[in-house]
Image (spheres, grey):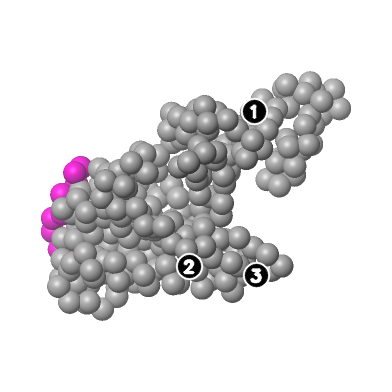
Amino acid sequence: MISKLAIQAAATYGFRPQGAKEPDDAYRAALIPYLEVRDWAAAYEVRLDRPQAEWTPAETQAFADHILSHKRPPAMEFDPGLHAFVVGELPSVGPASLDALIALAECALRSVTATRAERPTAEIPILCTALLMDGRSLSTATDPGRRLAFLNAVIRHAPVFGYIVATDAFLHLIDKITGTASKRDGFIVHLGTHDGARQMWQVPYRIEDGRVLFAPRVVLAGEEFRKGCGHDPYAELFVSVPPSGSVS
């Protein structure tokens, strides 16, 4: 018999109803990969037939390993063909620096959180910004599959100091004391520079009675970032394509 957990996940993400003569195992086998491209935690809940709050520490670690081994990273290059973006150029903030990059990240975070507060259930695109060496910045809205390709293209053709990526995502959090896992809505802001500085900000939120309630920001930087981030999809940006050329 299909569990209530699987039925709820299928309804939440618009999966088809179970066929009249379809075996339960066959339906679950079709549902899980469908969920994995939408919500990794929900898919793993169906796989274990238990909500995330009831997973053991070993199951929580297995979930993290499963994501790293199966999740396809964003493409570093565009597919052949034309890829159009509306790119805005922001005025120079003065000499490029980590402080200037953080100030731009603060602006991006204010923008996405204000949009979420105003429209609690709206789809919010990913914001990508590249800070150039002369203090100007190029910014666009993109989707999960093309954010790295966009930044890589800018880095290839401009002297880039650093980048910002702000995205609305599920935060898969693991309690440091109990080892239990939880899934929260939240914003993630990634910052990185050409000389290796790296930060990740997490801002969990929840919606109650139509209002958005934001939790305090968590900042991971330096060694704490390397321990907490796991696989870093942005690690190869400046390694694979060093800054060159100019943008006018």
Name which of mark 1 and mark 2 comes first in the sequence: 1
Q: Residue at x 25, y 50 (%)?
A: 222
Q: Residue at x 29, y 75 (%)?
A: 90
Q: Quadrant of residue 123?
A: bottom right
For label 3, count other residues whose C-alpha is less than 10 Å away and answer few (under 14), some (14-19) or many (20+).
few
Residue 137 on the magenta span: no
Q: Is residue 76 visible?
A: no
The image quadrant where one finds the C terminus is bottom left
Magenta span contains residue 242: yes
Q: Which residue is mark 2?
A: 112
* Disc 1 from disc 3: Cα separation: 32 Å
SS at mark 3 in the image: strand
In depth, the one of 219 and 135 nearer the eye is 219
Nearer to us of marks 2 and 3 is: 3
Q: Answer left or right for 108 relative to 132.
A: right
* Residue stretch rendered in magenta on the structure: 239-248
Kind of element beneath mark 2 = helix
Circle 3 residue: 211
Q: Amino acid under label 1?
A: Leu
Q: Residue at x 23, y 68 (%)?
A: 99
Amino acid type for the residue under numbered disc 2: Val
Horizontal and vertical percent position of residue 243: 15, 54
**Number of disc labels:** 3
> How many angstroms separate mark 2 from mark 3 (CA)?
15 Å
Q: Disc 1 designates what residue?
A: 48
Residue 18 visible within the image: yes
